[in-house]
Image (cartoon, helix red, strand yellow):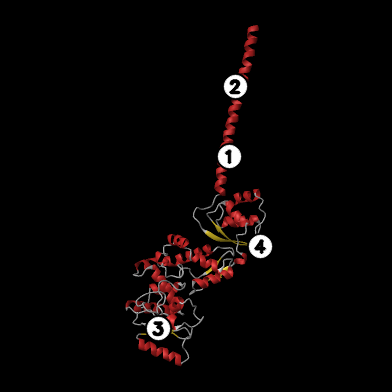
């Protein structure tokens, strides 16, 4: 009996050890499962907190007066700016985000959630939807003046960026239509003619470079529609843009512009000077209507001045203003004619003639009738 009792005493610790090992194995499995779930959760949250797309796409996002943080989150999800409304709610709760300032914001769909919320809680918004309308036929100086009226960028700062060689080189590498032609030392402003006229919305604290690149993006959109015609032309993109700026300045009515472009081509092909007054004003850095030009300004050589000496069969060295899509189309699809001269009357209507004698006769008739246009 004593021997049996000893054996029974030795069995009990073994059973306890087996049960302990079993619980340890279960606990380790639970810990492993929890660890896996934690990793999966972190990956899932990272995904939900990430940007909805990798490609940059800046859009305008409006927060109305009185909208709650959660209403804004719903709108952000609807517009594809955030990946998950749930992740958004978690983030704003953890970071004590209670409100946003009403306004119009520029948000990039390639930004992660934290950056989007950071922009909305900061001051990167456009007060009262600040907008600038750049009209057709305006030059860089006039554009700079308009920018200074509507943003915190001064006229001087804007023009200074226009003359930054390193920045211009960056833009040439970025945009297909900007070439080394714009770096000619005789050109006043390399980007003259390339900032597309349109109404743009900006933050008042926008930078000069942001304005410039927004306008160049629009220029890219317009020029790209005509790229096949531009590529097949015997003229470079710079020459086409230059000619479009002249047509814009010379033609008040859209219907006249194709004919005007045709006249310019006729004169170039004949080795004649373009004789365009608007180029002479630009060469002298005088805006139309500002004052009369002097005889010296008209008759002195300047690579912009097509009325001056040495410009037979030549375009100006570069554009003299921005231009409309209508003027671009006119240059790429001009009206064929045997006209070599044109003149506009007070109403803005353009009259075309074949010879210099016919042209002079028409000018005299317009003057006698009081219909001669005075700058």
Assign a secondary structure to mark 4.
loop
**At 59% across and 25% down in the image, what residue appears?**
22
Assign a secondary structure to mark 2.
helix
User: Which comes before the other along the chain, label 1 or label 3?
Assistant: 1
User: Which comes before the other along the chain, label 1 or label 4?
Assistant: 1
User: Which comes before the other along the chain, label 4 or label 2?
Assistant: 2
> 314 above or below 19?
below
Q: Pointers 2 and 1 in contact (CB under 8 A)?
A: no
Residue 278, picture quadrant: bottom left
The single residue placed furthest to the bottom in the displayed view is: 368
Q: CA distance from mark 1 to mark 3?
A: 78 Å
Residue pointed to by mark 1: 38
User: Which comes before the other along the chain, label 2 or label 1?
Assistant: 2
Q: Pointers 3 and 2 in contact (CB under 8 A)?
A: no
Residue pointed to by mark 4: 65
Quarter of the image with the N terminus is top right
Tell me if mark 2 has few (under 14), some (14-19) or many (20+) residues whose alpha carbon lies within 10 angstroms of its own. Answer: few
Q: CA distance from mark 4 to mark 2?
A: 68 Å
Q: Position of residue 198 (x, y in %)?
A: 51, 70
Residue pointed to by mark 3: 342
Q: CA distance from mark 1 to mark 4?
A: 40 Å
Q: Position of residue 263 (x, y in %)?
A: 37, 79
Q: CA distance from mark 2 to mark 1?
A: 30 Å
Residue 119, picture quadrant: bottom right
Report if residue 1 is visible in the image. no
Residue 259, picture quadrant: bottom left
Tell us which disc is closer to us: 3 or 4: 3
User: Which comes before the other along the chain, label 3 or label 2?
Assistant: 2
Assign a secondary structure to mark 1.
helix
């Amino acid at each position: 009996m004593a021997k049996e009792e000893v054996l029974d005493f030795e069995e009990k610790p073994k059973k306890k050890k087996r049960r302990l090992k079993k619980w340890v194995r279960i606990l380790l499995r639970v810990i492993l499962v929890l660890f896996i779930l934690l990793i999966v959760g972190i990956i899932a949250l990272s995904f939900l907190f990430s940007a909805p797309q990798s490609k940059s796409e800046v859009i305008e996002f409006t927060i109305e007066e009185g909208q709650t943080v959660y209403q804004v989150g719903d709108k952000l999800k609807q517009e594809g700016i955030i990946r998950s409304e749930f992740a958004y709610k978690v983030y704003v709760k953890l970071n004590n985000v209670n409100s946003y300032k009403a306004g119009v914001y520029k948000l990039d769909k390639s930004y992660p959630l934290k950056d989007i919320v950071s922009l909305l809680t900061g001051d990167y918004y456009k007060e009262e939807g600040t907008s600038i309308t750049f009209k057709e036929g305006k030059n860089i100086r006039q554009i700079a003046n308009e920018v200074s009226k509507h943003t915190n960028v001064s006229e001087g700062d804007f023009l200074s960026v226009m003359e930054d060689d390193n920045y211009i080189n960056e833009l040439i590498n970025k945009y297909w239509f900007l070439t080394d032609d714009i770096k000619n030392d005789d050109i006043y402003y390399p980007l003259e003619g390339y900032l597309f006229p349109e109404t743009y919305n900006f933050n008042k604290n926008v930078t000069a470079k942001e304005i410039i690149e927004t306008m160049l993006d629009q220029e890219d959109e317009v020029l790209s529609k005509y790229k096949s015609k531009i590529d097949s032309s015997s003229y470079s993109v710079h020459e086409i843009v230059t000619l479009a700026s002249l047509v814009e300045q010379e033609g008040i009515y859209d219907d006249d512009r194709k004919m005007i472009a045709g006249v310019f081509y006729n004169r170039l092909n004949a080795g004649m000077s373009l004789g365009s007054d608007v180029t002479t004003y630009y060469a002298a850095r005088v805006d139309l209507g500002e004052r009369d030009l002097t005889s010296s300004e008209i008759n002195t050589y300047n690579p912009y001045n097509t009325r001056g000496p040495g410009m037979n069969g030549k375009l100006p060295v570069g554009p003299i203003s921005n231009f409309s899509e209508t003027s671009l189309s006119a240059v790429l699809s001009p009206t064929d004619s045997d006209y070599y001269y044109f003149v506009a009357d007070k109403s803005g209507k353009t009259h075309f003639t074949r010879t210099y004698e016919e042209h002079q006769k028409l000018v005299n008739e317009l003057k006698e009738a009081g219909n001669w246009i005075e700058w």
